[in-house]
Amino acid sequence: DDRLGGVLAALFHDVPRGRLAGALAGPLGMAQARRVADLVGLHGALHRPFPDDERRSGLARMALAADLRVLHAVAGAVAEGTSGEQVEWSAMIAEEAGLLGREPLRALREGLRSALEGLGGDAVERCWAQARDLWVDGRLTTVEEAVAATWRWRSGDFPSLIQLVGPSGSGKSTFVGGLAGVGTRVSLDELRESRGSRADQRANGDVLRDGLDRLDRALAAGGTVVWDATSLNRQQRSLVGAVAHRRDAFVTHAVLLVDEAELVRRNAVRQHPVPPDVLAGQLHRFVPPYPGDAHRTWYVGASGAIEDTDGIESGGT
């Protein structure tokens, strides 16, 4: 699987990640598809100069999404000119930092999971996410340090945000309909509709501000809140993430990865289809989040079910 992932990532190294993951999910399965796409998205960073004092933490962040052995092999295979020297230097630093093992976080993840046995699922996931981020920053390395650093989240006394991520027709609303325990759903399409037309994009700024205000109030009240919008890129997600951070919410990205042909087919029969050029524009702008961008990530396929997860219960990279 590692070799196959590396070969496919090298072959498709210039294909947009969102399209690639959706196209590969059917033939490869979601877990392998999203790992190949993440290799494609990350390998280019190894070609560029990077401050050495920040390189370890940057590589550790990448290790949340990709096997660094495979990532460096892909970057080396497609390197041009002097970029290959940057890849070699990066691999040396990764090896010195102990990041080239197959699963550098496995012992920490399994140890913390065992230490927190008996806690609620979201509390365990939140503790793991916080420990993982501290590990990335080099602030902890052992299970004992992780247990001590995460005590404040063990009660589970925090709101929860599920942020949907995916183009029109990927199944976001259908997925939300199957979720249990949702207290509030903030839908930007429904807010536009309440103003007269869900297709009217002229007041997008006002709609977004209204949605963020509703999100803030819902998270302040506690419980589980769903943000129902395309959230196609990091900038769009960051606005929602800032509200969640302010309310100390546990954030789950629900990333919907569906093949482009299926999206086009679905759009043609939707109750509220978007113009073909709008869908094409969404696919062009779609940059899925990486593992570690939220506390937990769900990967939802064309079936509408969660087909892979990044979190304490995942198998790691």
Image (tube, helix red, strand yellow):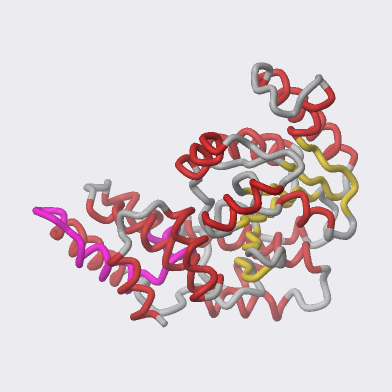
On screen, 295 above or below 213?
A: below
Describe residue 306's horizontal placement relative to residue 210 as left or right: left
Q: Residue at x 17, y 59 (%)?
A: 79
Q: Is residue 219 magenta?
A: no
Q: Residue at x 83, y 68 (%)?
A: 120
Asked if 252 appears above or below 240 in the picture, the reply is below
Residue at x 50%, y 65% (from the top left corner): 34
Quarter occupied by residue 99:
bottom left
Q: Nearer the viewer, residue 247 or 76?
A: 76
Compare residues 139 and 235 and report the one nearer the observer. Answer: 235
Nearest the camera: 154 or 283? Answer: 283
82 sits left or right of 100 in the view: left
Image quadrant in which the N terminus is located: bottom left
Write the start and end of the magenta stretch as one range: 59-83
* Residue 270 rendering spot, x and y as whole percentages: 72, 46
Q: What's the magenta bit mostly, secondary-structure-wise?
A: helix
Q: Would residue 245 be found to the left or right of residue 123 on screen?
A: left
Residue 150 vs 229, above or below: the answer is below
Image coords of residue 197 (percent x, y): 77, 24
Q: Whole-percent x and y of residue 113? A: 69, 76
Q: Quadrant of residue 202?
A: top right
Residue 236 position within the rendered picture, expressed as x and y whole percent measured from the top left: 58, 35
